[in-house]
Image: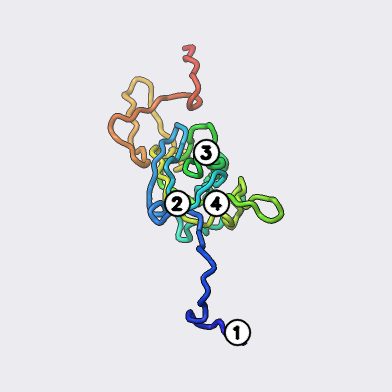
């Protein structure tokens, strides 16, 4: 039988174990991005960070980063995020993350951030995939929360806003996160693209 049963049996020091990943402070923190503009997370805090790591965005849920997407068609997934929620490889020695060179077009709210560290496996492959597996494998380290300032589109709530010609148009009941006085909306055929003026 083994003699290695209690702590006192382990007398020989062989070195230090460094665990790469987000710090406890990072895991409890909240970072902000704004819907409609590019989202960049800087000054990410952790130990033994390196370029090539990625962040994945998942819905707030009881299982945290172990959240399992039922399928790629799961409507509770964050498919509206660039890259289906997975960031591009980190830069600045693992301290800067971003989601493509595209604006966020996601509902305002708070999302869970999950970290995947870049490491080369013996077969030469990297264990930080560009697509989060359905069971979250490799993205299981909690890395804080992403607060997206912006409205929740009414289409996502299943209803439509209506105004009538000749009557003052008041848009009320717009829900979202971080909305405040001074925010603007614009009526457009396609968001972000110039609209053609009516002909009559």
Q: Nearer the viewer, mark 4 or mark 1?
A: 1
| Mark 4 vs 2, N-terminal side | 2
Q: Confirm whether residue 73 shows in the render.
A: no
The residue identified by callout 2 is 46
Whether residue 76 is situated above or below residue 163 in the rendered picture: below
Residue carrying label 3: 99
Disc on the earlier residue, 1 or 2 = 1
Q: Earlier in the sequence, mark 3 or mark 4?
A: 3
Callout in the foreground (2, 3): 2
The secondary element bearing badge 2 is classed as: strand
Mark carried by residue 80: none
Neighbour class for label 4 at 10 Å: few (<14), some, many (≥20)? many
Q: Distance between the residues labelled 1 and 2?
A: 37 Å
Percent position (x, y) of residue 106? 47, 39
Callouts 1 and 2 close, C-beta under 8 Å? no
Query: For numbered disc 3, what is the local secondary structure?
Result: loop
Extreme residue toward the right, this view? 123
Binning the other alpha carbons within 10 Å of mark 2 as few (below 14), some (14 to 19) or many (20 upward) gives some
Task: Give left or right: position of 163 versus 136.
Answer: left
Q: Which residue lies furthest to the left in this view?
A: 181
- Label 3 to label 4: alpha-carbon separation: 15 Å
The residue carrying pointer 3 sits among few (fewer than 14), some (14 to 19) or many (20 or more) residues within 10 Å by Cα, namely many
Tell me: residue 198, above or below residue 94. above
* Residue at the disc numbered 4: 116
| Label of residue 2 in the image | 1
């Amino acid at each position: 039988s083994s003699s290695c049963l209690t702590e006192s049996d382990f007398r020989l020091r062989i070195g230090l174990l460094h665990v790469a990943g987000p710090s406890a402070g990072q895991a409890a923190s909240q970072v902000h991005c704004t819907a409609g503009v590019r989202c960049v997370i800087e000054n990410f805090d952790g130990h033994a960070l390196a370029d090539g790591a990625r962040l994945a965005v998942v819905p707030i849920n009881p299982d945290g980063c172990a959240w399992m997407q039922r399928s790629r068609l799961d409507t509770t997934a964050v498919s509206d995020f660039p890259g289906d929620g997975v960031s591009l490889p980190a830069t600045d020695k693992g301290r800067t993350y971003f989601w493509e060179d595209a604006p966020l077009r996601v509902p305002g709210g708070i999302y869970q951030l999950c970290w995947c560290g870049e490491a080369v496996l013996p077969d030469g492959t990297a264990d930080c995939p560009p697509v989060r597996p359905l069971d979250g494998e490799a993205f299981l380290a909690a890395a804080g929360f992403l607060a997206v300032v912006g409205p929740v589109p009414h289409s996502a709530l299943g209803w439509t806003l209506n105004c009538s010609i000749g009557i003052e148009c008041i848009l009320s009941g717009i829900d979202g996160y971080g909305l405040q006085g001074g925010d603007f909306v614009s009526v457009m055929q396609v968001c972000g693209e110039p609209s053609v003026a009516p002909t009559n």
